[in-house]
Amino acid sequence: MDTLRESFAGQVIRAFTGARLLPYPDEKPDYVLPNRYRLNKEVRQEEHPDAPSRHPFHQDNLAPGNDYDAGQGRHSTTSEDSDATLTVDERLVTRQGAGGIPPDKIKELMGKSEIVTWYGIDDPENPLNWSLFKKCWLVAIIMLMTSSVYMGSSIWSPAVMQGAEYFGVGQVTSTLGLSLFVVGYGVGPLFLSPVTEIPLIGRTIPYIITLAIYCALQVPTALVTNFAGFAILRFLAGFMGSPPLATGGATIQDVFAAHTTPYAMGLWGLSAGASPALAPIIAGFAVEYKGWRWSFWEMLWLSGFTLILAIFTLPETSSGTILLRRARRLRKLTGNPNLKSISEISSEQMTGAEITKMTLVRPFSMTFTEPIVLAIDLYIGLIYAILYSYFESYPIVYSEMGYGWSLGVSNLPFAALLVGSLISYAGYCIWNK
C-alpha cells in the first residue's frame, strides 16, 4: 500500500478524499508525534536551556568528518572549518541542501522555522531505506518508460519507404520522421527536466503528465494524412517523451547508495541503448503485412501499458518533495506554522525570476559555458549520429535494394546491437568492481 500511496494515483486519491484513504502514519489516530515537534523551539529551550539539540540523529553522526546527509540519507566527509560556527541542527540543514543559501542566512532561517527532516537514519520514507524489491521495481518502471520513448524514435525506420510512397515525398524527406523525433527528445530536457527539481512538483508528476501526452500523440500520428502534420507530431512526441531519458538517472540516484548506484545506472543505460535496436525488429513484420500505421499502434500499446503501471506504482523519490509533504502534514497535525522542510524554505527564498532562471536559463547556460558539459554533449551527439545512421542504412542494405530480404527479416540485424549492449553492461559491471 505504501507504493500505491506514494504514486500519482495515490496522491490524487488522497487529494479527493481529504487523506481519509491511503493515510500516512502521521495521519493515523495512533500516531505518536516525535518530541522535537511537540513544542516550539523557544519553549524547549526555556524548559531545557542546557540540553543538547533534540534531533532524531545522534550528535556523533553529525560530528565533522562523519556527517549524515539528512536530505539524501548518506554519510559524507566534510571540513570542520566549513561550518564550525553552525549548531548541530544548522549543520544538518547544510547537509540537507539549502539551494545555495549561505550559512549566515541559514542561521536566520533556523531562528524562524523548525526544520522537518527524516525521523532517523532508518526512516522508512527515506528512499534510500526502501526495500530492495521496491528499488528494483522502480528501476524496472524507469527502464520501461525509457524504452517506450527510445523505441518510438526508431519505430519509423521500417516504415520509411512506405511513408515516402504514402505521403508523396522522397525517401530522404521521409526520414524526418526519425530525425525530428530525436531532435524533440534532445531539446525537451532543457525545458522539462529542470521542473523535476522543484520540490513542490517533484519527479513523478512530470513523468506521468508527459508520458500521458506522449501516449496520446501516438493516435493522431497513426491517423494523420499529410506529411507536415506527421512531422510536427513526431517532434512533439519526442519532446514530450524526453523527461525519463534525462531525469531517469536522477530518480535512480535518489534511491541507491553511492556504491550500488553505478550498477543500477548501467542497467538503465542498457535499456536506453538496446531499445532503439529492438523497435525495428518488432515493427518490421507489422509494417510489412499491415502497413506503416501499425508501427504507431504498437507504440500506443507499449506506452499505454507503461503509463498505467507508472500511474499506480511509480513512487515519488525526491527527498525534497517527500519532506515538503511531510512538513505540510505536521503543520496540519500540530498547528505549528513554523514546521518546514529545508527544500520548502529554500523555495520560499527564491523569486519567480530565480525559479525561471533555474529551470529554463541555467540548462542552456551550462550547455554552452561549461567546457566539460559541451564536450560530453558533442561526444554523445556523435554517438547518436552513428547509431541512427544504422536505422536509415540497414533497411537499404538488407532489403530489396541490397540483399533482397523481406522488410521484416531485413531488420533482424539490429539484434546485434542488443547483444553488444548486454556485453558492454557486463563489462561495465566487471570494471566497476
Image: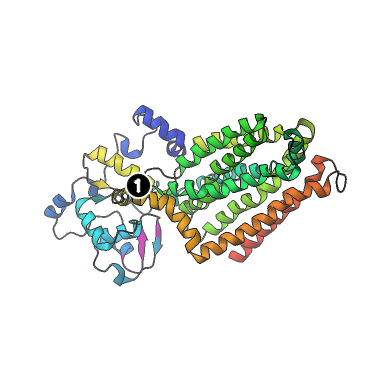
* Residue 377 in which image quadrant: bottom right
Residue at position x 66%, y 29% from top?
223
Q: Which residue is mark 1?
A: 323
Residue 322: quarter of image? top left
Q: Nearer the viewer, residue 124 or 201?
A: 201
Numbered circles on residues, count: 1
Q: Residue furthest right?
A: 404
Residue closest to the far top: 17
Residue 69 belongs to the span the image colors magenta: yes
- Disc 1 residue type (three-letter): Leu
Q: Is residue 213 visible?
A: yes
- Tell me the quadrant of the picture where the N terminus can be found: top left
Residue 417 image position (x, y, % from top left): 72, 53
Can the viewer see residue 118 in this picture?
A: no
Percent position of residue 68, x then y: 36, 60
Residue range highlighted in magenta: 63-74
Residue at 56%, 62% in the rendered image: 376
**Front in this rendered view, residue 370 or 32:** 370
Figure quadrant of residue 306: top right
Q: Nearer the viewer, residue 289 or 309?
A: 289
**Percent position (x, y) of residue 20?**
35, 29
Give the structural element (helix, strand or loop) at label 1: helix
Residue 8 lies in the magenta-colored region: no
Q: Residue at x 75, y 32 (%)?
A: 291
Above or below, 186 relative to 232:
below
- Left or right of residue 237, residue 254 in this image: left
Give the residue furthest to the left.
Answer: 46
